[in-house]
Amino acid sequence: MENESIQENLKKRGFFKIIRHLWPNFLIFNSFAFTISALYINLLILSRIMWPGEALELHAPELGALAGSFSYMMAISGIIFGILADKFSRIKLMSLSSLIYGIGLFFNGFAPQGLGLATFAYFLVFNLIRGFASGGFFPLINSYSYDSTEEKERSQFFGILQALYQLFQILGMLLSTILFQNLFWREFFWIIGLVVIFFGLMILLRAKEPKRGAKHKELKEILIDDTIKYEYKLNWTTIKSTILRPTNLIAFFEGIFTTILIAVPDFLLIAYLQSEKHISAFATSIIMVGFGLPGGVIGSLAFAKLSDKLGNKDIRNRLYMIVFSAISIFIMFVLFFFIPMPILTEAEGLNLAVIFSFPVVWLAGIILFFGRGVLGLWSINQPPIIQAINLPEAQGSITSANQFLETIGQGTGTILAGALLFIFGGNYQITASITMSLGIIGGLLWLLATIWVKKDVERISEILKQRGIELTQKNNINSING
């Protein structure tokens, strides 16, 4: 039955039922996850592809700009896709964004090699195309999942989404390093690009559009009737009464800082291991798979259930978990850069036995395990909060507005990290301390939001109760006239 709740689905088949029920979301988000770290994990190799002959030279400002410009384009396009998501079919928009993303990957494989700024410019253009497409992913996922899952189960969906994101992100790191290191980087872009294009076509042909508002507790009983549709649109009155409220405003601004805290570790950590410690891209990916992957997957799945349990008792608990995540990420990843890691020769950096013979590498891996474990708390708890304090017709728009500022923060974080590395002569300790300190501001803003969040949730509930009455009365009048 199409309207069967996620809770009933979980009882029947659990994890796999959620994936089957919401598979378009997983396809587009995991395609993004699989490819997003190909840039970060291969920083030194990309430098050599663009500027050959500069063996250990890391063009940090240029590569930081490459990552940052992706985020800026993602921020701009997210606004467009978010508005469209509240008006048109989420499925068609998911398909379109996936097709564009796949095309951006495929044609990146034709980049000329070794031409310096010309090669950089070619990568930049298709990186911007992918950034435009990926801007639609999360607004569409948020809008689609809002109308496809029960409120009390949303953290489990986002927990599974985040766990699989970390799984595919790290698997993508591993595959890309193997291919890039063996000069098959073109094949990576060509093959993965074609796969993502196929996913876009499959979503268009096989996925089903959920009914707006059908899973909200105040509306789901009346909207079971297929003849009744939720057709409310945003207007200035509802914008003032719901969107321009304290929790939403805080969520807008905290994203600028929180995403710096989330985005910078991957960029700096990988650059640190490869250019400073001379650990190869493949060995770096093994460290990420061995420690980061278990931490990310276990943490996301475990915290998802805990988040739902605590969030159902009091939505402020979700805010506390985000604050805990921000503080923990700051401590663990700053600490990582102060561990006395050995400086290896290039030959030693290729030898896994040599790398893992140092106890300090295992200590760094343990820190990475716990850092990745708490990293997903923000992604698990922030979307259900945003969904709870906004109306059905605002889900795409509000997510895209948040994403705009979040990706601005993410892009600024990587650009700032690259610039600070250059300014401080490659000092990762100073760079990490400065950039990660900015991220703590996001956690403090969420702590401030605990003052207003319950009132903002109750306001949405009251509006939807009234609309449920209006839809029932309208249906009764139509039945009499009919």
Image (cartoon, grey):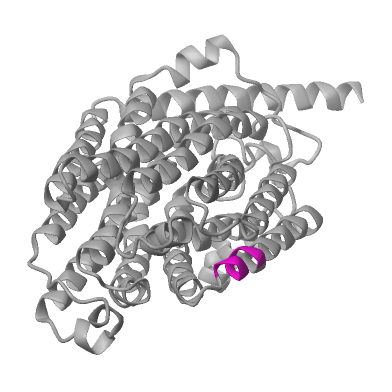
Q: Is residue 186 magenta?
A: yes
- Residue at (33% x, 43% y) in the render: 61
- Where does residue 469 sit, x and y in percent of width and height? 63, 24
- Residue at (66% x, 37% y) in the render: 212
- Where does residue 72 sit, x and y in percent of width and height? 47, 34
The answer to which image quadrant residue 224 occupies is: top right
Spot the residue most to the bottom. 353
The answer to which image quadrant residue 146 occupies is: top right
Spot the residue most to the top. 237
Part of the protein shown in magenta: 185-190
Whether 420 is drawn above or below 245: the answer is below
- Where does residue 426 sit, x and y in percent of width and height? 18, 51
Whether 67 is drawn above or below 34: the answer is above
Q: Quadrant of the N terminus?
A: bottom right
Whether residue 170 is visible: yes
Spot the residue most to the front. 53
Tally of numbered discs: 0
- Residue at (67% x, 58% y) in the render: 106
- Where does residue 165 sit, x and y in percent of width and height? 46, 61
